[in-house]
Amino acid sequence: MEKIIQLTTEDSENVALWKITNDKSTNKHLFLIHGTFSDKDFFNGFTDYFLNLGYTCWALDWRNHGASKKTNKKFKIATIGKYDVKAAFRYLTDTENIGKLHCVAHSGGGIAITVCLIHHPEFKKFIKSITLFGVQAFGANTGIQQNIKLRVAKLFSKLIGKVPAKLAGSKNNDETYFTMKQWFNWNIYRQFKDSNHFDYEPEMKEIKIPIISFCAKGDDFIAPKEGCQLFLNAFQNPKNELVYCAKELGNLEDYNHSRILKSRNSMKELWPKAAAWMNTHS
């Protein structure tokens, strides 16, 4: 069963938070957030798996994505963390009175949660664990070739004003150049800074929530292993875990950026690892 809750953010945007349950759902809670070019439907199947483990799932649609209202206001990835994720956490903790929950994020969703917890550390006490799939912010620039690819992609998106979803392997939302420019700059210049020069990277170590991060051999542009490792290392928690997925290591495939979470093979071998991580930190 799905119920949609419309939330108003502090910057006056309207975003959709979905409550997803079935007859097995209990007081175990799981918060999910998608990345760019996507919406809450990216987690279809994944939510069914965790519902059957007794979780109540809460999935957020970014502003201008999914069931959230359309906006003409320009926004950055960091904006989602500062306002959209904050609105969701505020609702879950204050209105629903959820004492503790687990978080799962794909791609830019993991960046948004990180930004939120840096700007709004009061929510850290409510989170038992975080599971990341293909998440990095400032480590995709792994060499000369990658640097060129990032700069060409940035220039192309600037010329046409957007990054088409199809080029990113998605069928859903195009993203504006304004939104993606921040991600390109973070990676090109290897700096995780906001427009006012606020540096997120040194603040990440204040987030001591247990984090498991899944990265894929086939994800060599958006979230390569080196970038995911760099992002995870910034939390400076030796208990955090990076899971590198590659056939040479015994995995079923060399996953790409989307299949690391949304595929039959990830369902077989990665979703159970995510569930085990949550159980360990419950």
Image: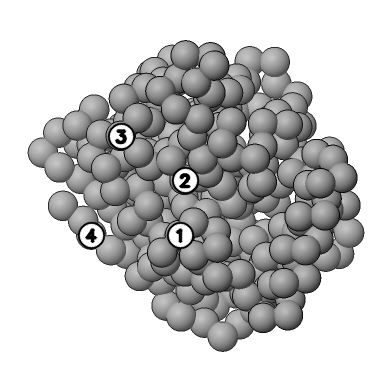
Q: Which residue does the image show at 35% across and 38% down from the upper left?
A: 263
Q: Which mark is residue 258?
A: 2
Q: Secondary structure at mark 3?
A: helix
Q: Decide: is 150 above or below 213.
A: below
**Label at residue 170:** 1
Measured Cα–Cα span from mark 3 to mark 4: 26 Å
Q: Residue at x 47, y 14 (%)?
A: 250
Q: Amino acid at mark 3?
A: Arg
Q: Earlier in the sequence, mark 3 or mark 2?
A: 2
Q: Where residue 229 sits: x, y (%)?
A: 70, 29
Name the residue carrying label 3: 264
In depth, the one of 90 and 258 nearer the eye is: 258
User: Which amino acid lies under the numbered mark 4 shown in the image of this protein?
Assistant: Lys
User: How far, Cα to Cα, is label 4 from label 2?
Assistant: 26 Å
**Does residue 228 appear to the left or right of 70 in the view shown?**
right
- The answer to whether mark 3 and mark 4 are in CB contact below 8 A is no
Q: Which mark is residue 3?
A: 4
Q: Residue 196: which quarter of the image? A: bottom right
